[in-house]
Image (tube, rainbow, N blue to C red):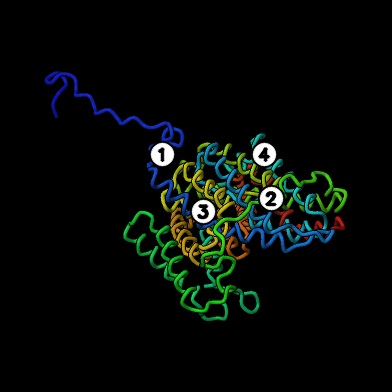
């Protein structure tokens, strides 16, 4: 190495190329990404989520409210795409994270099967709006961020691993690779055996994507979905496959590529009617359930996506987390205003992150595709659930890699982590897994002499989840069960 006094000042380092305003806004270069990665990630996330365009209208339109009224499937399709598109773009621009949002299945079940039988649809959606308002207030007051920061790091890692298993189970179930057998236990295939061309399509897509991943091919999961879709289209054309075997999306060209949007459900909300129609106790219990499910489902998913995308620091915190959480709350409000149920963070966003998405630009791409789907909904319905399922299974496998970072040598950490990981797929609920982990962590740490490691907020969360797990008994005491 030459000395400075021998050669004079060192030569100037080559100037860095000027970054575009778009690059600076979304931190594309900062996060080690590129425009092709973001576009591919946004496309992959959309394809993994596209089933919600068909599934949400099927579920909500299939339930009558207390007056016997039902929602229009065509209107629900338009509103599902509209809310998902707008809020996902908002997440990209405001939160600048690769997180997509759509009608949340967990909340949707509460809306359809717990709330609708007790009140009219506008009153149901009024409660969904209040759910969003409550979540936003938690963000503004710092409660939601405090909860996120209060979770121990090992528990945050366990949440990510558990969500990986949960995502994989969703994929296996969507592909009919596993199903519920006798006694409620899972079995392979629909009859205890793997049968039918749709399962073959899933296996082909899974293996193609896995091989490409092993060979470090960029876009491996996206290509797997495309190959599976092409195979499905050929199979469906050549062999007589019953439509119900494919699920909600049949891989065939529709008669019409364009659909006429129907915005008739927009704004059909009654913010106060639920409290008189169903009674204050029943409405309060439903609202509590909505807030709890939305709060912790989104919390766990955001942590998992941030960990997978490499956006979290050593303490597990994400940049711009308050904005991300606020947009999630705004999504619930939007879902209520559009009668499409709460639009919340979708765990399928991890598929896009696996494909390289690191910034909000991917979310803008996903949101734009949802808005396009308002007009091209029949075309987007070509991708069968079996094709998207292969992405979810592989994402689950890769999220499991974080399990080695959990401290399994300390039983007071290992048991809560184990419960968190296993109960998410076993109960089909992210919130239940998080709740069990929090309760176990607080109790075990406290009574094993490590109570100083348990913060006050963890005790509050333990009490909340104790109420959540004992909700049936509380409802009976209140006379609303």
**Which label belongs to residue 63?**
none
Quarter of the image for the C terminus: give it.
bottom right
Residue under the point 48% across and 63% down:
393
- Mark-to-mark CA distance, 2 and 3: 26 Å
Q: Secondary structure at mark 3?
A: helix
Q: Which residue is mark 3?
A: 46
Q: Secondary structure at mark 1?
A: loop
Instruction: Name which of mark 2 and mark 3 comes first in the sequence.
Output: 3
Q: Which residue is mark 4?
A: 136
Q: Is residue 194 visible?
A: no
Q: Position of residue 133 (x, y in %)?
A: 71, 40
Picture quadrant of residue 134: top right
Residue under the point 62% across and 61% down:
55
Q: Which residue is mark 1?
A: 28
Q: Secondary structure at mark 4?
A: helix
Q: Which numbered disc, 2 or 4, marks the residue closer to the eye? A: 4
Instruction: Name which of mark 3 and mark 4 comes first in the sequence.
Output: 3
* Of residues 236 and 124, the one drawn nearer to the viewer in this rendering: 236
Residue under the point 52% across and 41% down:
92
The crowding category of the residue bearing disc 2, from other C-alpha atoms within 10 Å (few below 14, some 14 to 19, many at least 20), is some
The crowding category of the residue bearing disc 3, from other C-alpha atoms within 10 Å (few below 14, some 14 to 19, many at least 20), is many
Q: Which residue is mark 2?
A: 292
- Mark-to-mark CA distance, 2 and 4: 13 Å
Is residue 446 positioned above or below 378 on the image? above
């Amino acid at each position: 190495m030459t000395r400075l006094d021998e050669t004079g000042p060192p030569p100037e380092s080559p100037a860095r190329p000027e970054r575009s305003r778009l690059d600076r806004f979304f931190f594309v270069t900062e996060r080690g990404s590129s425009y092709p990665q973001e576009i591919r990630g946004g496309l992959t996330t959309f394809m993994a989520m596209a089933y919600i365009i068909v599934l949400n209208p099927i579920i909500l339109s299939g339930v009558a409210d207390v007056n016997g009224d039902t929602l229009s499937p065509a209107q629900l399709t338009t509103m599902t795409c509209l809310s998902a598109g707008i809020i996902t773009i908002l997440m990209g621009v405001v939160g600048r994270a690769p997180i997509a949002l759509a009608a949340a299945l967990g909340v949707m079940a509460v809306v359809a099967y717990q709330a609708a039988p007790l009140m009219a649809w506008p009153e149901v959606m009024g409660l969904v709006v209040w759910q969003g308002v409550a979540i936003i207030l938690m963000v503004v007051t710092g409660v939601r961020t405090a909860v996120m920061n209060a979770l121990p790091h090992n528990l945050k890692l366990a949440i990510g691993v558990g969500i990986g298993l949960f995502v994989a189970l969703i994929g296996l179930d969507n592909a009919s690779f596993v199903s519920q057998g006798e006694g409620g236990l899972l079995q392979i295939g629909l009859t205890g055996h793997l049968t039918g061309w749709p399962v073959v399509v899933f296996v082909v897509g899974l293996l193609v994507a896995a091989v490409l991943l092993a060979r470090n091919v960029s876009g491996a999961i996206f290509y797997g979905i495309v190959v599976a879709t092409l195979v499905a289209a050929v199979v469906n054309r050549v062999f007589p496959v019953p439509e119900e075997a494919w699920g909600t999306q049949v891989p065939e060209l529709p008669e019409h590529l364009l659909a006429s949007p129907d915005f008739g459900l927009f704004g059909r909300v009654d913010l106060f009617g639920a409290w008189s129609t169903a009674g204050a106790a029943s409405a309060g219990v439903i609202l509590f359930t909505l807030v709890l499910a939305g709060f912790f489902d989104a919390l766990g998913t955001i942590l998992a996506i941030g960990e997978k995308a490499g956006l979290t620091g050593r303490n597990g915190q994400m940049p711009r987390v308050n904005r991300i959480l606020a947009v999630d709350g705004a999504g619930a409000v939007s879902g209520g205003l559009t009668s499409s149920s709460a639009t919340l963070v979708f765990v399928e966003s991890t598929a896009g992150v696996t494909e390289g998405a690191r910034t909000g630009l991917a979310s803008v791409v996903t949101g734009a595709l949802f808005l396009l789907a308002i007009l091209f909904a029949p075309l987007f319905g070509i991708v069968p659930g079996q094709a998207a399922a292969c992405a979810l299974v592989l994402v689950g496998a890769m999220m499991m890699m974080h399990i080695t970072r959990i401290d399994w040598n300390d039983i007071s950490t290992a048991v809560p982590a184990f419960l968190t990981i296993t109960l998410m797929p076993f109960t089909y609920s992210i919130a239940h897994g998080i709740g069990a982990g929090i309760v176990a962590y607080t109790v075990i740490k406290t009574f094993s002499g490590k109570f100083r490691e348990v913060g006050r907020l963890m005790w509050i969360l333990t009490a909340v989840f104790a109420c959540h797990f004992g909700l049936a008994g509380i409802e009976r005491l209140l006379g609303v069960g």
